[in-house]
Image (cartoon, rainbow, N blue to C red):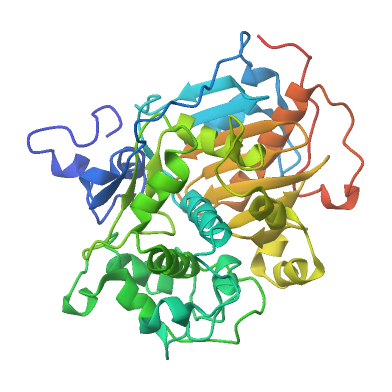
Amino acid sequence: MSEVPLMSGFPSDPALRVTLVNWQDPPFNQWSFQHLRELIPTQRIPRGQGPVRPLARHDTMLDPGVVAVQLVDDRVSTLAELIEETSTDAVLVVHDGRIVLERYYGGMTPDTVHLLMSVTKSVVGCVAGVLVDRGQLDPSLPVDVYVPEVTGSGYSGATVRDVLDMRTGVLFREEYTNPESEVRVMERHMGWRPGLSPGYIGGMYAFLASMTAASHHGGPFVYRSADTDMLGWVCERAAGVRMADLISTLIWQRMGAEHEAEITCDGVGSAIHDGGMSATARDVARFGQMLLDDGYVSGIPVVPSRWLVQSRMLDPDIRGAFTASASEATLTGGWYRNQFWYVPGPVGDLQVCMGIHGQMVLIDRATRTVSVKLSSWPTAQSPSQLLDTIRAFVATGRYLAGLSGHGHNRTALTGPIGVVEGRGRGRS
């Protein structure tokens, strides 16, 4: 099958055809993640008419074969090998504001948009941060104030802060291998899977309003994609603007994106806030660089600095919520705040935006490095590939910054992340 391109023929051969039934499964997902608008209704996220933020290439590009990586199984590999072995569609590394590595695979090019999955959540979190800064959104208020339709549902009484940090008590199982888990049922409501019936006519928002509670709000962190969808609905009501246009005017245009992005929507036009965005690797890197620069682009504020600083400030409450979660076993010592993941690294905390099937933006403030990987993993989740990718990007940042040793802070927490020094010191 790999010798003949998917979707070949007029019409395409049934064996090569990508559909709503198979688009998230291998090998079809490599094609679909780059062509989602051909399968699912999609709204444009215009870049506007403003200047493109420069993203210059370094005079000497990085050879990924010289960066050594200690994998979670204790083998020593390289960044090049990890890229090759983890279904990579694009990888891009920016150090001190300049591209040092940029490669594409599987038919992807610099101007191809790729599905970001839950990296979308971090973009929506930034939209919320701007609305909070403008006084249009109050994190302390219940979501019912903005969306009365959820009064009496599992979301009733949950605050905006609860959905921002995924600490609601809503019953929601993020079990990708279980077709009857809430995350898969929600996909049928939002048009990502077949099976639409009269009961699904209300779309994703009707599903959110039908959810029940499993526990009290404000408790442990539990990764629930539905919480981001609830947050997006709240943002739209607070601003009186749909999400595609909020992202465009508040984030994409102001950060100097080069290409327009996209976001899928359900059958009634509601954006899929939890994972529907597609964008180019370079624009995703621009987003990561904006985060690294505390929300500024060319001296102009895009996302409020205090919002980003608050996100990465660890306190006992937010740490305790994460400790009690299932995520602690994989991302030991981490936390989740304002739709961002944080993980302790060898020389500083790492900010991570990530999505299933291998989508990642890693911001390493200690080494001034932004690393982007867009992928089509054959499975939705792989803890070993996730940690290996983080380790590889940490090792890359340290190599580029010329750091030696294993760092000195939080040494007891560096085990899941790990690092091995790069081989040699120059670029090739």
- Above/below status of 309 relative to 317: above
Q: Position of residue 221 (x, y in %)?
A: 64, 71
- Above/below status of 312 relative to 202: above
Q: Is residue 347 visible?
A: yes
Q: What's the residue at 38%, 69% (across, down)?
A: 237
Q: What's the residue at 42%, 38% (across, down)?
A: 253
Residue at the far right in the pictured view: 408
Quarter holding the C terminus? top right
Q: Position of residue 200 (x, y in %)?
A: 23, 75
- 388 and 33: which one is in front? 33
Q: Position of residue 251 (x, y in %)?
A: 47, 44
- 167 and 240: which one is in front? 240
Q: Quadrant of residue 420?
A: top right
Q: What's the residue at 26%, 50% (across, down)?
A: 42
Quarter holding the N terminus? top left
Q: How many marks?
A: 0
Q: Is residue 215 left or right of residue 66?
A: left
Q: Is residue 86 visible?
A: no
